[in-house]
Image (cartoon, rainbow, N blue to C red):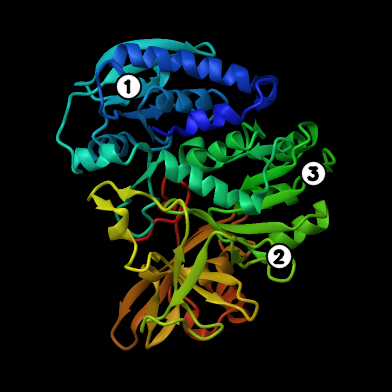
Amino acid sequence: MFSIVEAIRERAKPEAIALVQKERSLSYQELFLRSDAIAGTLKSVLHLGQGRTDRLRIGVHFPSCLDYVPLALATLSAGGCFVPIPDELADEERHELLKRTSLDAILVIESAAAWVPAEALKVGSFELNGQNVFIFRLPESETAFPRGEFEALNPAFIRFSSGTTGKSKGVLLSHSSLLERITAANAGLQIGPGDRVLWVLPMAHHFAVSIVLYLYHGATTIIEETHLGEDLLRAGSEQKATVMYGSPVHYRQLVEAPDVAQWTTLRLAVATAAALDAATAQKFQARFGRDLVQGLGIIELGLPIMNLAGAQEAPEALGLPLPAYQSLLKDESGHEPATGEPGEICLKGPGMCDAYLDPWLPRNAIVDSEGWFATGDLGKRDSAGRIFICGRKKTLINVGGMKVFPEEVEAVLDSHPKIQRAIVEARLHPLYGEVPVARYIPSAEGAPTTMEIRNHCRTRLAGYKIPLIFSVVTELPLTASGKLKRL
């Protein structure tokens, strides 16, 4: 049966450097030696490959670092299905993840093992770079999904979507689907053995597409421990990084960083995970002489859209579909809207997820009869066909028949110098049906007055889009991946 790990192993040059973190590095040969040793331990204590035909779901709770990679690969090499357990989750959220995936085993660093359920049985341990990793076996439980269908898919990976507007979905990917999507994404990224990728995102949220893609194409992944702009600049320069793949937050810090180093080897910078603002893109281009390319990363389909050709002309655009993908916008009547008008973004292409886990929905129930996947995102096209994100379909605010995308209003509020971050939501109104209201975290220098905010908005937004109420808060609800969590 096809294994993405074996596919990486077959292509790798043993002496090439796979991973770097500060003074530490692992060649591809060392990476697989370490991964194989862990896999051997897992097979032994979990009795994998000893007459078992089922695919155990193995949760991994480990800090985002160099050692995460051999640990994750080992779960797959041992014949398991890799289930990342994000470090930032609360204990109750971790227990919910265990329940919904019906986890069979957990790998967890000793210092973080207190949350593991009392009924879990410790069956073994091993050392990884001076840290003890415990192996727990969980009691067998009823699954919310059909085991036979699950096994037949050759499952490799389960990750939960962000759940920004409701209950998150357990997204299941097979080994074959992983290969399809990293191959399709690389038609745009063009990652190769000569590339050195500066890694700044959490492993638990991005490992199965990004890290797997870099390994499969023979690149070196440089893991940076902090996200301060000057540290990113210094790491990019000292490590001669050629590619950076991060969120707009990382790039905002990078463009404002003091001039501690000259980063001259960068050839590609991709922004994902949140909306990119034009000001950051323009500052990046001016400082580094490279376009900041926005991309649409989506757990169900990978990286289907990138703004490779239009980053200077339209930096805020998601861009055009990569060669293997097709896009379609659908208005309320199910048709492609006119240029500049919003519609739900629908996509079609390779690497589509194989199923949703809980409740169980196989691929043919996730896409329509023609193979289109409805993302739930609303977008519009410009005259060049580029797609711009407007917001989520579920968060659209209807003000007397006029459409308000909270994401657009939030971007304006976030650009105010006295506002750190804002969230805009709908409130029922007796006359207009709904009106937007805002909550925001003020900057360190203090909160702006309501009049200051309104004046800031008036020059950038139509009147009906301006929130009726502005409330100061100390924190905003966020998903595990840092996105705003809406009611």
Category of crowding for the residue at label 3, using alpha-carbon neighbours closer than 10 angstroms: few (below 14), some (14–19), many (at least 20): few
Residue beneath disc 1: 114
Mark 2 and mark 1: Cα distance apart in space: 49 Å
Q: What's under tag 3, amino acid-wise?
A: Pro
Determine whether the residue tagged by mark 3 lies in a helix, strand or loop: loop
Residue beneath disc 3: 258
Earlier in the chain: of badge 1 and badge 3, it is: 1
Name the one closer to the observer, 269 or 483.
269
Determine whether the residue tagged by mark 1 lies in a helix, strand or loop: helix
- Say which of marks 2 and 3 sits in front: 2
Q: Residue furthest front?
A: 1
Earlier in the chain: of badge 2 and badge 3, it is: 3
Residue 136 location, quadrant: top left
Q: Is residue 5 above or below residue 157?
A: above
Residue found 54% across the figure and 15% down from its top: 33
Residue 173 location, quadrant: top left
Q: What's under tag 1, amino acid-wise?
A: Ala
Percent x, y of residue 433: 31, 83
Residue found 68% across the figure and 70% down from its top: 314
